[in-house]
Amino acid sequence: MSKLRHYDVIRNPVVTEKSTMASEHGQVVFDVAMDATKPEIKAAVEALFSVKVKAINTLVRKGKVKRFRGKIGVRNDVKKAIVTLVDGQSIDISTGV
């Protein structure tokens, strides 16, 4: 897989209270492409951050129905990947890749 495809698979890190608490247990949360598979996500994380991945859990967050000036709209669905790293490995998401 090319390096450009890795950047297409991993969109951005998720920085929330819940993901920060997960980082204490060796987990990192990323928004990923909707068509990305677990092996693609694992290969992208290992290639971009030079770490070993133990497990990948994915979930699809459904888009909310929101109103804007009386019109109903729908936010896009987002796929998230919770990446569990091997013990002793870490990713500092505050620095750029």
Image: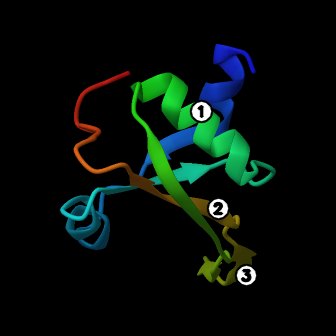
- Of circles 1 and 3, which is in front? 1
The residue type indicated by label 2 comes to Lys
**Residue farthest to the right, as pictured:** 35
Distance, label 1 to label 3, CA atoms, is 36 Å
Marks 2 and 1, the one that precedes in the sequence? 1
| Nearer to me, 40 or 65 | 40
At 71% from the left and 40% from the top, the residue drawn is 40
At 62% from the left and 34% from the top, the residue drawn is 43
The residue type indicated by label 3 comes to Ile
- Is disc 1 placed on a helix, strand or loop? helix
Category of crowding for the residue at label 1, using alpha-carbon neighbours closer than 10 angstroms: few (below 14), some (14–19), many (at least 20): many
| Nearer to me, 61 or 29 | 29
Q: Which residue is mark 3?
A: 72
Marks 3 and 2, the one that precedes in the sequence? 3
Q: Which mark is residue 44?
A: 1
Q: In the picture provided, is 27 more to the left or to the right than 76? A: left
| Nearer to me, 84 or 23 | 84
- Is disc 2 placed on a helix, strand or loop? strand
Distance, label 2 to label 1, CA atoms, is 15 Å
Q: Which residue is mark 2?
A: 79
